């Protein structure tokens, strides 16, 4: 009897599930929502690495298919899953318009979130029938954006009848008829205007500033990425007890090493040898010597990270992004250069994902590419320190009692003084200086 009741319940649930599936036409992105609802079997805190394990993929692969109308002709393009910490975004712009032909997985719109820009792709090849959402709308995962029809024909550019007549050489209207009408019309004398009376100039206080006219100003909405950057920087300033220490490094030996082996490096590894990889390796060595710089405060506890994920600040046209090089302590120079080039390319193309920028234990910012001589960078939460690189300038220095012109760079380390003392900060920056000035230290681990 119990087995018969259980089988009846299972049949009713199956029927209800089928009815739910038929009632929805935009289940294409539900795979992401379902995966967000499935609890992780192993999850660390936000300050440590996150690892998620999902059950058998065959259980939820059906949700990744896009649902069509009853005739199977029309499909709905919906906003995809945007990441665990991203709940909504702004529809920045449409890349296509109604009547345009699109291919499967071709981007038709862009969603701007607090961290990255995400594309809305067409589920099938066809023609955009209509756009449902509007630019500037706040959208969430699953929001319908456009309707794609497989049987519709692309819109063609039609010429107006007046333009066709003009193109065929139709004669313009005669000027004589216009002049005759003007002759028949009675002449009306304009009224005599009296000269305005002179008015006294407005008296302004000598201390009152003369503001420019409002016609010369433009007010535009702040992009979500810029809002996010502004909030994070201000939160960092309000939270950390930030202090900066400085040093200078002689780049002679590193630049000579790069010049001597750059061709062989490209031939073997297929990537150019830059300065950034050496600074990443130097930072890894310094972080291993001073583990407190790689740690972070979490409430009343200190979390020590036994791995090194280096965030590299990259400036783009839309703002500053900080992608992460994972496990930099296990990489060689070639791996680091390939990782940096890949992340920089994705950043310039706007193809960075949430995972590319999540985490990070230490940040390197190179303002020298823009010509910055010296700066005090701001810590990137939830990290505790950031290294600032600057431009290389020929300056006179004393070497073995002689005054020589050497390529010099200023280094700046901003750190959270609540956690890191000045002693550890100075030792950390001194280690980077020693390794950059004599890269052989990395080989000998001294």
Image: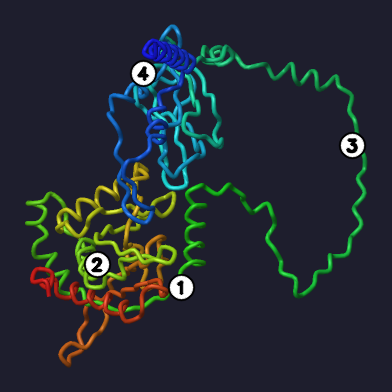
Disc 2/disc 1 C-alpha distance (Å): 22 Å
Q: Real-space Cα distance between discs 2 and 3?
A: 83 Å
The mark found on residue 241 in the picture is 1
Dot 3 or dot 1, earlier in sequence: 3
> Which numbered disc flags the more N-terminal residue, 2 or 3?
3
From where the camera sits, is residue 445 visible? yes
Residue labelled with disc 4: 125
Q: Position of residue 172 (x, y in %)?
A: 62, 17
Q: Is there CB contact under 8 Å for labels 2 and 1?
A: no
Point 30% across, 50% down: residue: 344
Binning the other alpha carbons within 10 Å of mark 1 as few (below 14), some (14 to 19) or many (20 upward) gives some
The residue that label 2 is drawn on is 283
Looking at the image, tell me whether mark 4 or mark 1 is earlier in sequence order.
4
Residue at label 3?
190
Left or right of 208? Residue 276 is left
Q: Residue 92, how many percent across, how many down?
A: 50, 38
Farthest residue to the top: give it. 71
């Amino acid at each position: 009897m119990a087995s018969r009741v259980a089988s009846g319940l299972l049949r009713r649930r199956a029927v209800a599930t089928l009815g739910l599936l038929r009632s929805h036409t935009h289940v294409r992105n539900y795979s992401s929502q379902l995966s967000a609802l499935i609890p992780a079997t192993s999850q660390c805190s936000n300050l440590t690495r996150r690892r998620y394990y999902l059950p058998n993929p065959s259980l939820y692969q059906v949700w990744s298919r896009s649902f069509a109308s009853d005739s199977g002709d029309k499909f709905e393009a919906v906003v995809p899953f945007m990441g665990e910490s991203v709940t909504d975004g702004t529809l920045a712009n449409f890349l296509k318009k109604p009547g345009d032909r699109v291919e499967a997985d071709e981007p038709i719109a862009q969603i701007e979130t607090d961290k990255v820009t995400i594309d809305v792709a067409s589920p099938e090849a066809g023609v955009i029938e209509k756009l449902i959402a509007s630019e500037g709308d706040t959208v969430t995962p699953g929001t319908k954006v456009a309707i794609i029809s497989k049987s519709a024909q692309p819109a063609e550019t039609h010429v107006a009848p007046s333009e066709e007549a003009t193109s065929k050489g139709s004669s313009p209207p005669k000027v004589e008829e216009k002049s005759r009408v003007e002759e028949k019309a009675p002449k009306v004398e304009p009224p005599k205007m009296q000269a305005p009376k002179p008015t006294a100039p407005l008296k302004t206080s000598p201390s009152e500033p003369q503001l420019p006219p409002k016609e010369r100003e433009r007010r535009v909405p702040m992009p979500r990425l810029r809002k996010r950057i502004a909030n994070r920087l201000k939160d960092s300033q309000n939270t950390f007890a930030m202090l900066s220490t400085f040093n200078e490094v002689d780049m002679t030996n590193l630049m000579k090493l790069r010049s001597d082996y750059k061709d062989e490096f490209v031939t073997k590894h297929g990537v150019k040898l830059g300065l950034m990889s050496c600074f990443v390796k130097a930072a890894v060595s310094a972080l291993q010597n001073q583990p407190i710089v790689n740690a972070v405060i979490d409430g009343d506890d200190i979390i020590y990270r036994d791995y090194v994920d280096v965030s590299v600040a990259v400036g783009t046209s839309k703002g500053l992004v900080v992608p992460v090089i994972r496990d930099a302590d296990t990489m060689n120079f070639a791996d680091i250069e390939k990782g940096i080039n890949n992340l920089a390319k994705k950043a310039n193309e706007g193809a960075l994902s949430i995972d590319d920028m999540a985490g990070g234990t230490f940040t390197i910012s190179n303002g020298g590419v823009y010509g910055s001589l010296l700066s005090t960078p701001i810590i990137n939460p939830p990290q505790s320190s950031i290294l600032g690189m600057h431009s290389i300038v020929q300056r006179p220095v004393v070497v073995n009692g002689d005054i020589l012109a050497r390529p010099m760079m200023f280094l700046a380390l901003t750190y959270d003084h609540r956690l890191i003392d000045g002693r550890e900060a100075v030792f950390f920056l001194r280690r980077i200086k020693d390794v950059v000035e004599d890269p052989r230290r990395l080989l000998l681990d001294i």
